[in-house]
Image (tube, rainbow, N blue to C red):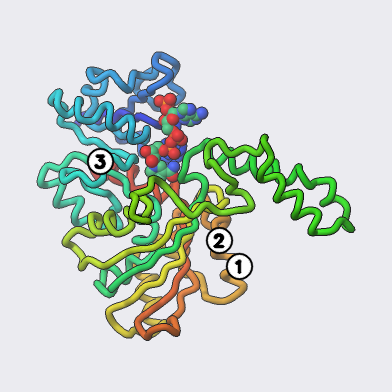
Amino acid sequence: MSKFKVGFVGWRGMVGSVLISRMVQENDFKNISSFFYTTSQVGEKCPFSFSDCDKLLDGYNLDELKKMDIILTCQGSDYTKKVYLDLRDSGWNGHWIDAASHLRMENDAIIILDPVNRDLIDSSFKQGIKTWVGGNCTVSLMLLAIHGLVKENLVEWVSSMTYQAASGAGANNMRELLGQMGYLYNSVSDLLHDKNSPILDIDEKVSESFEGKDFPKSYFGEALAGSVIPWIDSDLGNGQSKEEWKGPNETLKILNTNYEPFKVDGLCVRIGTMRCHSQAITIKLKKDLSEENVLQKISNGNDWVKLVPNDRENSIHNLSPTKASGKLDILVGRVRKLNLDNNMFSLFTVGDQLLWGAAEPLRRILSIITK
Ligand code: NAP
């Protein structure tokens, strides 16, 4: 049987490069014929020895795209808006796999998170669905963290307060965060080297630096290093950010009718970490379960959940973005029955948002389709 022809668009960006490196790690390219498209470097040499094209193809050329059985794009919503409908209208009937949010809520698109909604993926595949979209990173990471409770239909509602990494905003934002850190450090490095310098002098200089005319903030628009930004994505005009809107709406779409629906709400906050999102979750269960029972159910959720004991040492040393970075683990700790109500629990979860939050569900749907 001939191999599926898969066209990759957006492979050079942050999500795309993580995807390619995971596919190389898992030896996925041996199962497909791969072709690489670009929106800016048409005709340049393709950098991958395993590719079936020598030169980079034009990501806007519908005739070139139509030759593919599957197109996998991590290029972003603007690209999807420009190409997707024209390609479908031209009669192309291949599988479209997308990291961008633009098509997520369309009726003929499935939000993919196969450890949670494999049944929905399989039934949709049988019905002829051919558009597969990765979910919002915090939603996917939250659902994986509480999967064990969700699959037993135990959840009444969830409130998630997020601590989201710079990587969620793109490669340039990650660079800017580090630029801000360097700028702040440089503004007080002489004082830091003098052990006797007063801390209030250091603090005053740092405060002044935030206002410095060279302080790098063209991507975030504000200081993230030494600060937080309590708004992510666009303003819906009702006090809610688009990122917060995705929580309940994408959750419902991912769970579909395979699970009982539950309410989700919360605040989304950008913090100065590199690529792992954390969430402080308050969860109201439908039943009064013991802490031990809840822990057991959470750890049975899926193969990636890793419980961290709720004590000081483990929480400080084993439950942080630095411990989740570059790994598929979904760390879950601080699980505790709250004093507010017998059915309420806290938990803190951390996951690499470029892996389970972005690239991994795309890699896995490609593998499901091609197998
Ligand atoms: P990105 O890093 O900004 O890359 C997008 C495209 O920008 C690249 O494919 C590349 O296209 C072009 N580009 C221009 N200059 C570049 C440079 N110096 N280095 C690398 N690429 C450059 O975008 P992304 O963060 O991967 O996000 C892609 C899509 O995934 C977006 O829709 C985003 O919303 C979605 N998503 C992102 C995340 C996340 O964590 N970042 C999570 C889930 C979903 P050409 O090669 O064609 O020029």
Q: Residue at x 39, y 57 (%)?
A: 141
Q: Residues within 10 Å of mark 3 (few under 14, many from 20)?
A: many
Q: Residues within 10 Å of mark 2 (few under 14, many from 20)?
A: many
Ligand 1: image quarter:
top left
The amino acid at mark 1 is: Ile
Q: Is residue 26 visible?
A: no
In terms of image quadrants, where is residue 52?
top left
Q: Residue furthest left?
A: 127
For residue 306, above or below residue 71: below
**Residue 316 image label:** 1
The N terminus lies in quadrant: top left
The residue identified by callout 3 is: 103
Which mark is first along the chain, 2 or 3?
Answer: 3
The residue identified by callout 2 is: 320
The amino acid at mark 2 is: Ser
Q: Position of residue 252 (x, y in %)?
A: 24, 59
- Front residue (pair 362, 194): 194
For residue 144, above or below residue 14: below
The amino acid at mark 3 is: Leu
Asked if disc 2 and disc 1 are in contact, CB closer than 8 Å, the reply is yes
**SS for tag 2?**
loop
**SS for tag 1?**
helix
Q: Residue at x 26, y 27 (%)?
A: 83
Q: Position of residue 288 (x, y in %)?
A: 32, 85
How far apart are the alpha carbons under marks 2 and 1?
7 Å
